[in-house]
Image: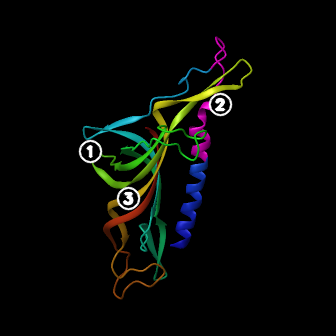
Amino acid sequence: MRSRVSAFCRVLATMMSMAITTNVFAGSTDQPNPANNTIPANGSVQSPATQTFGGLTFGVGLALSENVQAQSRVTSAQVVNGIVRVTQTNDAIAGIVLESHYFFVPNTYFISPSIVPALDWGHGPFVAIVAGSGGNDVVTAFALGWMIGFRQPTWTTDSNGQITGKPKYSSTASWNLGIGLRVDPAVQVLGDGIVANQPLPAGETSVRYKTVPGYGLMVLSSFSF
């Protein structure tokens, strides 16, 4: 369990570093406009991706989830010389999720006025779902948590490429980071009496499984304010 959490934290730190470098400060990589040697106020800002599910419109996010239960989620196992050997688990999951959030926007800066001004960041609850692949509006997992978001800035430069003035902040595009509880209604684990790296129960010749609810930690990044 401790090794799974440590690995999860290392992956999370890498994701945060990459996301901050490539999204929050994306405006600083823009090229000057040859017509007036400036960057349009929101020239680099793209409309956040959305998707409709069950008649509702969700934002699209990237999520990393880790099983926090002691029992591993087993995808496959086999019996080798009478001993149960787990060949594949599904304790860590990364992928696309659909999310919706509500931000409280404080009338105060974040860290300092020069880093994130007042009204250009927010925090609040989010919900996220993992949609099934069957096309029948089936939800295979649900998450609920808290999120913080920062509006995407865009800078203006002069003819020498030097930043002039204060950045302008998008009303829709942002970088958000949330953490919450993920619930999977049905995950596969080893059946009762079947223990990894132990002999099968007397009289049994194959591995049994069972389906139970699963609980985990989700870290989510999305891109709309």
Left/right placement of residue 34 relative to residue 182 reads: right
Which residue is the site of mark 2?
A: 29
For residue 214, which quarter of the picture?
bottom left
Magenta range is 18-38
The structure residue drawn at horizontal position 60% and vertical position 29%, both measured from the top left corner, is: 166
Query: Residue 185: where, in percent of width, then height?
Result: 30, 61
Furthest residue toward bottom: 202
The span from disc 1 to disc 3 (Cα, nearest Å) is: 18 Å
Amino acid on which disc 3 is placed: Arg
| Viewer-side residue, 41 vs 181 | 41
Whichever of labels 1 and 3 marks the residue nearer the N terminus, that label is 1
Query: Residue 115: where, in percent of width, then height?
Result: 60, 41
Furthest residue toward right: 160
Quick check: 15 above or below 189?
A: above
Query: Residue 68: where, in percent of width, then height?
Result: 44, 68
Secondary structure at badge 3 equals strand
The structure residue drawn at horizontal position 52% and vertical position 42%, both measured from the top left corner, is: 109
Quick check: 186 above or below 191?
A: above
